[in-house]
Image (spheres, rainbow, N blue to C red):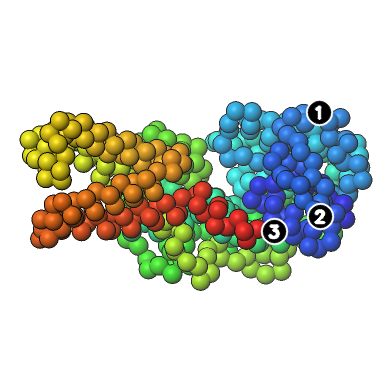
Amino acid sequence: MNILLLGNGLIGCHLRDALLIRGHQVRLLSRRALAHPECEVIQGDFAALQNAADWLPLLDGIDTVINTVGIFAESAGQSFTALHHAAPQALFAACEASKIKKVIHLSALGADTDAPTAYWRSKGLGDVALMQSKLNWTIVRPSLIYAPDGVSSRAFCTLATLPLLPDLQAVGKVQPVHLHDVLALLIKLVEQPVAQQQIINAVGPLAIPLTTWWQQLRQGMGLASAITLPIAACLQNLAAKSALLPLFQPDSLTMLRAGNCSDAAPFAAILSRAPQAAAPVNGSARDALLGWLLPLLKLSMALVWLGTAAVCLWAWPRADSYQLLAGVGIPSAWQPLLFYGSVAMDSLFGMLCLLDLLGVQTRSWRLQWLLVFAYSIIIAIKLPQFLWHPFGPLLKNLPIMALLLMLDLLSPSKQCAVEKPKS
């Protein structure tokens, strides 16, 4: 079957591979997709195709159209109106003109023209545009999708590994669905004659509280249940206004409070089995734990460097600092320069740690390791009393050096270098 697949995100890229394995001919439209040896890739901006005439060349020779394009948050050049309504409306008109046999449109559970968020309303408008056509259409409305390699799923797993889980009060139930079940549904819709002009809610087996799902994620990663802390609605609203956490964005919170559930029986009937649980199976918690431990470790290193600079500059007697420099053989004329240079270096490394915490890859971990190593060797030789001190001030540099080495090896640039030969 000749298929036009729109979108190369989480669902799009997995669906492309599944369709190719099953022998279908795939034409892929995406802004960022790279050339693929087994399918025809067309670089294009879905949002820019606002007229039916823009779509006609892409539909030449196509039997089935699958639209997986969607965004959860707007950005420059990517609006809900363009991606969820205007472009799909033009696409559906072109499909009618080209007499496309089947259109499969991925929407979202909760989509409605009167929904409480702009995301749901725009999805609802796109659905209405398709429902008003004369095409053989199917609208798939998935709930929260769990995918082991999905960005949002990894974020949820990271949150689930916290030793204390938030229990959001006044939040509705969720019914997360596994990506494998969504893909199985889409494959069936492509290959089998099913009822025309239908809406299918793709949901997991049970509607459960959000905190219960997090506990299930923990169990799937091999962790014991965590203690929960009730978070009142007013505190949730304050967190939403701060806009620091994606989960607590105002629209996300609104949708969580509205709930995200549906009857799983129709979905199970099409799959010919019950949907599987949306959680890891014999998974490892390592990567999820690193999701919050690494930022915590980076913050701790920033505080070490900045705290050291502050203590040297304002808290510790300047004369004592100069006496230590004299103890390692620094002449008195050079002591102020070395003192302020050390404070500046500590401050710089502290700021670089904070930048790395914010996502700017400074690649300074190895330099920090070298500085701590140099400090340790010089002090051990010139000021051995710190090496044999009962509080172990110098020995504590060993775990700090191990931490810096770990942060260096786990930095994205290093991980890419390690993984590159495998591809």
| Mark 2 and mark 1 residues within 8 Å of each other at the beta carbon | no
Local secondary structure at mark 2: loop
Asked if 421 appears above or below 327 in the picture, the reply is: below
Give me the C-alpha separation between circle 2 and circle 1: 29 Å
Q: Amino acid at mark 1?
A: Asn
Q: Amino acid at mark 2?
A: Glu
| Quarter-of-image position of residue 81 | top right
Q: Position of residue 121 (x, y in %)?
A: 62, 35
Specify the label residue 38 is tagged with: 2
Local secondary structure at mark 1: loop
> In the drawing, does residue 394 fall left or right of residue 199?
left
50, 397: nearer the viewer: 397
Asked if 284 appears above or below 328 in the picture, the reply is: below
274, 248: nearer the viewer: 248
The crowding category of the residue bearing disc 1, from other C-alpha atoms within 10 Å (few below 14, some 14 to 19, many at least 20), is some
Asked if 312 appears above or below 396 in the picture, the reply is: above
291, 87: nearer the viewer: 291
Specify the label residue 200 is tagged with: none
| Quarter-of-image position of residue 402 | bottom left
Residue shown at the point (51%, 48%) measured from the top left: 413
Q: Amino acid at mark 3?
A: Leu
418, 186: nearer the viewer: 418
Residue shown at the point (18%, 54%) measured from the top left: 381
Specify the label residue 51 is tagged with: 1
Q: Check the picture and name the quadrant holding the C terminus.
A: bottom right
Reading the image, the residue beneath label 3 is 183
The crowding category of the residue bearing disc 2, from other C-alpha atoms within 10 Å (few below 14, some 14 to 19, many at least 20), is some
Q: Is residue 391 visible?
A: no
Give me the C-alpha separation between circle 1 and circle 3: 29 Å
